[in-house]
Image (cartoon, helix red, strand yellow):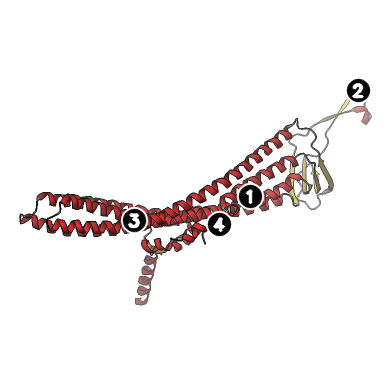
Amino acid sequence: MKTRLVFCFSLLIYISGFSQETPTSFSLQDAINYALENNRTAKNATKDIDAARQQKWETTATGLPQISAGIDYQNFLKQPVSLIPAEFFGGNPGEFAEVIFGTKHNVTATATLTQKLFDGSYLVGLQSAKVFLEISKNAKEKTDLEIRKAVVNAYSNVLLAEESINVLQRNIENLDKTLFEITKIYENGLEEEESVEQLQITLSSVKNNLNNVIRLKKLAYQMLNITLGLDINNPTVLTDILENLTSEHISLGLLETNEFIEETIDYRIAQNDKTAKELLLKLEKSKALPTLNTFINGGYSAFGNDFNFTNRDQKWFGSSLLGVSLNIPIFSSLGRRAATQRAKINLEKAENNLTETQQKIKLQIASAKSDYQFAIEDYENKKQNLNLAQRIEAKNQTKFLEGIGSSFELRQAQTQLYNAQQELLQSMIDVINKKAALETVLNDVD
């Protein structure tokens, strides 16, 4: 009995352990890899490839032998009557005899084998199925690139919120300390009340910003979880540090990357569209060609005035047929010509789109490189600005505490410092995100 209780208790602990959510830790690369497998959009893109493979075989199968079978049963509730000249049976000329042909119950079982011998649209269909599969694969690659960029953006936004909270909390600690000292000086009559009020205003503003960032942090984690394919409230933990991640994403060599437009995913997608339009044109032209099919069928039939088809002595009569069907399109009132001309127009549009896409990609790459270079330069500039703002704030605080500086000047220096802190954090995020944007345009994600 004791052993059974111990077993049940252990089982309950084991089950409860699985029912609780456990934090999931991710570096940025881990998060990207996880999202590519579990993001719901990525999963659907993979399913689209599987569906394209099935459609390819579905198209192929239409040109392979097809076998069908059928059973027909007829029960004449009232059989039709035919009138036959009576003289056929020795009757009087001009008179008719009522005759019933056939039996009341009829059963026919047949099986038919059909095979395409020539069909131009089928050959085009095979090519189209292959292109459709390639389109699905390119769409999956495009989806993966966008998901990767989305993960980088969501991940960096969480780091921004985390680091902003740390900075604001340090600022609040420093402000609390300064406010405490000034309050004591004011209580001793050595400082004006305005100085205390100025610091209280600054402290209140910083605390309000902290509360807002804490709320934004929760939203940032939820957005990251959705992007990863996790439950929105999953307790995710990030292992990368914003400053280290920023340094890792500074790659000046990426700015010198050669532009291979034909290898970018957007160009390949536009090329797929052009190829598809070419096949549609071929399809319309193929409709003017004759089609040739062959078939062979065989079957058995049984007849009776009573339903005795399950009896062994029931007679079944066999039949078979071999045939060839040739269909030659002759005149369609210029309908096929109109369809062909429409397909040509669509092909010309696809060619124009391909050329435009090529030009847009060149512009996107140039713009992404410029944005990335500016982000790096801005990051270095913001680091210098923060150092200057820290020195200015420290000097003004010393002057203020020594009584040779005003509270207004101190508040200006503090505001400038806080802005410099946030600008530096934002510049770090820009470096990471702009690099991801450039890699997405270049298809350079290795």
Upstream in the sequence, badge 1 or badge 4? 1
Tag 2 residue: 94
Callout 1 environment at 10 Å: few (<14), some (14 to 19), or many (20+)?
A: many
Upstream in the sequence, badge 3 or badge 1? 1
Tag 4 residue: 258
Q: Nearer the viewer, mark 4 or mark 2?
A: 4
Q: Is residue 109 left or right of residue 424?
A: right
Q: Nearer the viewer, mark 2 or mark 3?
A: 3
Q: Residue at x 64, y 53 (%)?
A: 54
Q: Secondary structure at mark 1?
A: helix
Which quarter of the figure has residue 10? bottom left
Q: Position of residue 241 (x, y in %)?
A: 37, 63
Q: Nearer the viewer, mark 3 or mark 1?
A: 3
Q: Residue at x 78, y 41 (%)?
A: 289
Quick one: 406 or 37, which is closer to the camera? 406
C-alpha distance separating marks 4 and 2: 100 Å
The amino acid type, in three-letter code, at marker 4 is Asn
The amino acid type, in three-letter code, at marker 3 is Lys
Tag 3 residue: 382
Upstream in the sequence, badge 4 or badge 3? 4
Tag 1 residue: 132
Q: Position of residue 223 (x, y in %)?
A: 40, 53
Q: Nearer the viewer, mark 1 or mark 2?
A: 1
The amino acid type, in three-letter code, at marker 1 is Phe
Q: Is residue 77 above or below residue 436?
A: above
Callout 3 environment at 10 Å: few (<14), some (14 to 19), or many (20+)?
A: many
Residue 214 visible (yes or no):
no
